[in-house]
Image (cartoon, coloured by chain):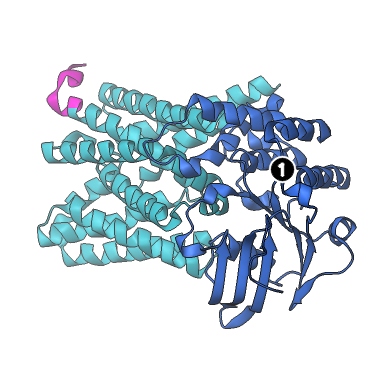
Amino acid sequence: MDIFTEYFFQRALLGGLLIGLTAPLMGVFLVLRRLSMIGDTLAHVSIAGIALGFLLHVYPIGVGLIFALLASFGIEWLRRAYKTYAELSIAIIMSGGVALATLLFTLGKGFNINVMSYFFGSIYTLDNTDLWVVLGVTVLVVGVIAFNYKELFLMFFDEDAAGVSGLPLRFYNIMITMLTALVITVAIKIVGALLVSSLLTIPVACSLLIAKSFRNSVFWAVLFSEVSVVGGLVAAGTWDLAPGATIVLFLIGLLIISLFVKRGLRL
Amino acid sequence: MNPTANAGCHQSVVSIDDVFFFYENKKVIEHLSFNILERDFVGLIGSNGAGKTTLLKMIVGLLKPSQGEIRLFGQPISSFKDWERIGYVPQKNAFNPLFPATVREVVLSGLYGKKRMFRRMTKADQQKCEEALYVMRIEDLADRRIGQLSGGQQQRVFLARALINNPELLILDEPTVGIDAETQAGFFRMIRHMHQHHHITFIMVSHDMDMVQSYIGPEPVQKSGTLSFYVKHTHEPENCIETNLTHSMQQLREQIEVLS
């Protein structure tokens, strides 16, 4: 049980709680726009950037972020080209990202171990720089969403009506896209690229089952996410398991319970 | 077909001046000039692809004409800022029915357009929301999620959202698609009542020829391609006097039948 007093575990908890707050905040908007898979896609492209960062000896998350941003604009652009097949653009960019990452791995054979930690997450190895970056992203995301709550509600509920009320849709679309890329890139270190979309989507999936209003659904999504981060980390620490995996499995557990509770109430 | 504004109380609300719209090199709209005056009721009828939605989107600034100019209340759209003067009721399927918003949240969001960023919702705003809910007879549904309502109820929610700003121009994009015939008839009665007793100009896109013709008349005043414009003017001078809104809103509520 000593692990809970260890410095690295407390850092992990702090980083986890911050990401546990921002990921579902962005996730609410992505799920409502039926872009649940965007998290996976951006994460895979981000891995390619992280690999390039190791290759060039530049801060890997920084390069990963640039790649994720480029990918998110690529998705928006393809989404306009294939209007009725929004998911097609996601599939194209995702496979492109994986291909690029694979290519970069073969160029720098020595760093495979390091890059692997980004696939599966390494919340225990968060250093000071990582924590500051996560904190900065959290403050930015929470601030932007708090101050633009009304605009985002308008836009995500009914984009045409939002346009008629004079909202600069393009600006807000770009803003959401950039914030998503930012959140995903920093979340990769916590839960790993393979699991990042679960933090964005599963808390929202739970909250949509029980929320009575939009405001309420944002609250529940964050609560589900934070409970899972704490629960998952405690489970990982107690039984020496992979923390990214325990967090996600905890989330899925909560989802199953919510489904049963919902069904139980209906009967 | 005179695009200049008339004298008196009948100011031009929308003026369309020789507008063209191309989509992928195809002419969707060409040489369209049309003037909508205060308190007109304009019915827009056309087959699929006739450019109804394109025209609506140009009027509300979501699309730019490829050529020509559109003015709202005398101002070019590019410099038009008073969007709260315009209410917009979308097609039923324009929003995501799984969106977890309550009826009250949706109606209140009608005010969000002018309450940006740091501006908080006030008591007066909440009051306006309650009034709009009351007028449309949906106060009992206020805490329900919008996706759980019937099509007819949803349309009244969207009307309430549009009315919360006391709009001078109300734009309805196929408001009765996917709603049963009886509810449609009730909806049209309500719209007619609003036109006759309120200081509101209407533009309604519809596929329901019968309804438009029974209210406006059998002949379109203008055709552009397969797009037909039906217009009912409100000429009577006494109608120029602004009606007492609170009083007439109460009347409107009385007109609205409770639809199950």
What kind of element bears circle 1?
helix
Residue B238, image x and y in percent? 78, 47
- Location of residue B241 in the rendering, given as x and y in whole percent from the top left corner: 71, 45
Going 77% across and 73% down the picture, which residue do you hit?
Answer: B222
Left-right relation of B67 to A240? right
Q: Is residue A95 left or right of residue B191?
A: left
Mark 1 highlights which residue? B155
Give the farthest residue toward the left. Answer: A57
x then y, percent, for residue A213: 55, 30
* Residue B13, quarter of the rendered image: bottom right
Colour applied to chain A: cyan
| Nearer the observer, A266 or B210 | B210
Chain B painted colour: blue
- The quadrant of the image that shows the C terminus of chain A is top right
Which residue, as the protein is rendered here, is positioned at the far top? A1
Horizontal relation, residue B61 to residue A3: left or right: right
